[in-house]
Image: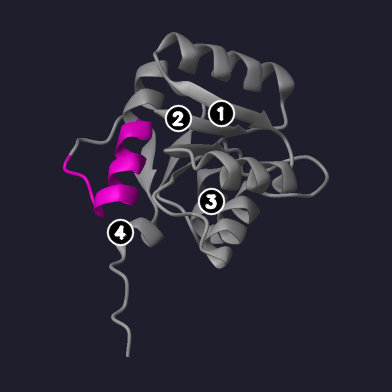
Amino acid sequence: MQVLIVEDDVMLADCLAEALVDDGHVVCGVVSTVAAAVALARRHRPDAAILDMQLSSRERGSDVADQLAASGDLGDTGVLYVTGEAERVHQEARVGHACLSKPYTQAALNAALIIVREIARDGGTSRPLPRGLQLLRSATTPPQPAI
């Protein structure tokens, strides 16, 4: 699976990227700003994006998903927020599929990536949720029919 990582903690981002590559994923980029994340997502069309909710310089990971959705560039990219503030994600994120609470295991992260990819591509999943993963209401609310 091709994955974009948006994380402002350099050490955490590097460890995350290395673990994903070790598990057979392709990391198309590791960035710490909304502008860089949107540009990479448009260029690579990743299968999933791992977004930290609180980025430095007052940016939020949810801004990445919002901008891609608004421009029609989100496509089938699964959006996974990884954060220590799950409640904040539920309150503030308008676009996304799931939130994985820190700390988490590598197995939970891999399962979460598969789940958000399936939701984005197929509209749902029947897989059991790993510990710490919560689906977002935007992922569980069916789209309204066009009038």
Q: Could you tell me what secondary structure mostly forms the magenta stretch?
A: helix
Q: Nearer the viewer, mark 4 or mark 3?
A: 4
The reply to whether dot 2 and dot 3 touch (C-beta < 8 Å) is no
Instruction: Name the residue furthest left.
Output: 126
Instruction: Name the residue furthest front.
Output: 43
The percent position of residue 125, horizontal first and vertical second, equals 21, 45
The percent position of residue 91, horizontal first and vertical second, equals 53, 59
Measured Cα–Cα span from mark 2 to mark 3: 23 Å
Asked if residue 124 lies in the magenta stretch, the reply is yes
Q: In the rendered image, which quarter is residue 71 located in?
A: bottom right
Measured Cα–Cα span from mark 1 to mark 2: 6 Å
Q: Is residue 129 left or right of residue 56?
A: left
Q: What amino acid is labelled 3 in the image? A: Val
Label 4, secondary structure: give it: helix
Q: Earlier in the sequence, mark 1 or mark 4?
A: 1
Write down the residue under mark 3: 89
Label 2, secondary structure: give it: strand
Local packing at callout 2 (Cα closer than 10 Å; few below 14, some 14-19, many 20+) is: some
The reply to whether dot 4 and dot 3 touch (C-beta < 8 Å) is no
Write down the residue under mark 2: 2
Q: Nearer the viewer, residue 31 or 97?
A: 31
Measured Cα–Cα span from mark 1 to mark 4: 27 Å
Write down the residue under mark 1: 28
Label 1, secondary structure: give it: strand
Q: Is residue 82 left or right of residue 8?
A: left
Residue 131 visible somewhere in the drawing: no
Write down the residue under mark 4: 140
Q: Is residue 131 left or right of residue 90?
A: left
